[in-house]
Amino acid sequence: MIQVRAIDRENIQYLVRNLEDFEKDKAIKSGLRAAVNVFRVKGRSNLRARLLHHGKQTNHLMNSFTTRVKRNKLGALSGFDRPGGNHAHLVDRGTKRRYTKAGTTRDIMPGNSFWDDAKQTEENKAMQAIYQSVQKAIQRINDRR
């Protein structure tokens, strides 16, 4: 799971200073939703580029990418849902050589780091998405007045 928090709270609070409380929540939550969608899109594209080729099908994993904005706190989560998300960590980090009780080995799967790379490369883009989406939401709210 990738958790997104608005680190620079003062700037965001400055943007929403003239809005009412429920409008502030809507604007900030739309910004957080935009930020976690950045991670979701990059994670899916990384997975597509690194794993999906002839003979490899990961439809459950591709469909398990999910995002959620927290209800009572300022924050959002991006990660995996069922049924494919149960094994996402194995695809991301890989597996080592495993032995059964009978002594036979199970296959090794090299990790392809699609999710860890999405987190590292898209962090700045996600912060920009928060600011831009909050500004758009404020503009929409002000246009309605």
Image: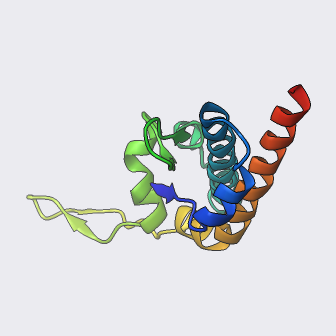
* Residue at x-position 66% and y-position 72%: 121
125 or 53, which lies in front?
Answer: 125
Q: In which quarter of the image is residue 15?
A: bottom right
Number of dots carrying numbers? 0
Residue 53 visible to the viewer: no
* Residue at x-position 13% and y-position 64%: 103
Q: Quadrant of the C terminus?
A: top right
* Residue at x-position 69% and y-position 71%: 124
111 or 129, which lies in front?
Answer: 129
Q: Is residue 37 above or below residue 81?
A: below
* Residue at x-position 60% and y-position 49%: 56
Q: Spot the residue most to the front.
A: 18
Percent x, y of residue 30? 68, 41
Residue 114 visible to the viewer: yes
**Left or right of 2, for residue 128:** right
Q: Spot the residue most to the right.
A: 143
Percent x, y of residue 110? 46, 70
Q: Is residue 120 above or below residue 118?
A: below
**Left or right of 7, for residue 94:** left
Q: In which quarter of the image is residue 65?
A: top right
Percent x, y of residue 85? 44, 43
Q: Quadrant of residue 72?
A: top left
Q: Is residue 130 above or below residue 144?
A: below
Percent x, y of residue 106? 29, 61
Q: Quadrant of the N terminus?
A: bottom left
